[in-house]
Amino acid sequence: MLKFYTLILMLFISYASIGQILHYENFAVILDTNKHVKGNIVPSFQFQNLKEDLIKFENTADFSVLLGHNALTVANKVEFSRFGDETFESGGYFYAEYRRIQDTLPFALEPYLQAHWNEVRGLNRKYATGVNLRWRVLYKKNVGVFAGIGPFYEFEEWDYRGVPDSDVSSNITNSITTELIRMGSYISYKQTIAEKFILDFSIYYQDDIQNLFDTPRAGSSSRATYKLTRYLGLTLLYQNMYDPSPVVPIDKLYHNVKFSFSINI
C-alpha cells in the first residue's frame, strides 16, 4: 500500500516554467474561520540507474495559519534534477506573508518577502519584498473574492542559459542584474463546492512604478482540485506569465501545466 501511494505521488505532468511572477494567490487562504491551519503538499521523487544515476526531486508546499486576527502564509518549492555529476535543472522559491485581519474593515496590509530561482531559464536569483493593501471584496465560509495593490522592491540576476544558442553571441558570458521598484496588483476568486471541489483563479499585473503602463508584466493562474479523501486530492493547475521586455532574449510568454495528486491539510 505504501508503494502504491508513493507511485501516485510521483505522477505529474509539467510543461515549461513560470517567469518572475510568483502566483502567491494560489497559496492556501482560510475561508472557514473555525479552521486554524490549511495547506497543500505536492511531493515527487524519481530515481533511475541509467548510464549515470538520474535523480529527480520536486516538492511544493504552502501553509496558512490563522491565530485570532493574525494570518501567516509560508510557501516553498524546490526542483532538482541530477544526472551523474551534472545538475541540469534547479529551481524553486520561498515566500512568506503576514496579514492582520480586521472584522470591521474589509482592508488589510500584507507585507511579504520572496526569494526565487530558476536556473533552467537563466534566473540565478530573485529577491523581492513589498506590501499590498488587500481588499476582501467577498468573504464567506466557502467563497472569497480578493483584490490587492502595492509597491515592491525587486532584484534579479540573469544569465544566458535559457537563451537559444542561435541567439547568444559567443563572447557573452557575464550575468545581468536589475533593480526596480514596481507596483503590483492582483484579483483572485476562491470557492469550495460541496466540500469536494476547490476552485482557485487569479490575475496579476506588475510594472515599473515610474512607468506603470509602458512594459507591464501580466500573469494568471487557474487551479481545480477534486478531493478524493479528506487529505488526498487530484489537482489540475495552469499558470502563465507574459513579459514584453525580458532581461535576456527568452520567450515572452510562458506556461506551466501540471496534473498531480496533492496532500491537503
Image: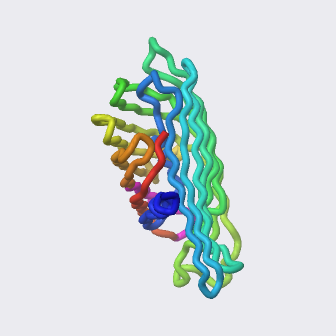
Highlighted magenta segment, given as a residue range: 238-249
Residue 210 horizontal/vertical position (percent): 54, 43
Q: Nearest the camera: 168 or 128?
A: 128
Horizontally, residue 72 falls left or right of residue 10, namely right
Image quadrant in which you'd find residue 174: bottom right
Out of 170 and 1, give the one closest to the viewer: 1
Query: Is 173 positioned to the left or the right of 150 in the image?
Result: right
Rendered view: 120 above or below 233: below
Residue closest to the eye, 136 or 208:
136
Which residue is at 56% across, 22% downward? 100
Quadrant for residue 194, please give it: top left
**Residue 62 belongs to the span the image colors magenta:** no
Task: Indicate the colouring scheme.
Answer: rainbow
Q: Position of residue 212 (x, y in %)?
A: 47, 44
Q: Residue drawn at (56%, 37%), measured in percent from left and top?
A: 151
Most distant residue in the front direction? 1
Residue at point 56% right, 56% down?
59
Q: Is residue 52 left or right of residue 227?
A: right
Residue 14 location (% of width, % of height): 44, 65
Residue nearest the observer in this picture, 121 or 252: 121
Residue found at x 39% / y 59%: 259
Confirm whether residue 118 shows in the render. Answer: no
Residue 66 point in image, percent of width and height: 54, 26
Question: Looking at the image, how many numbered discs can be counted on the residues?
Answer: 0
Q: Residue furthest left?
A: 194
Furthest residue toward bottom = 51
Does residue 40 appear anywhere in the picture? yes
Q: Is 17 rendered above or below residue 69?
A: below
66 relative position to 261: left or right: right
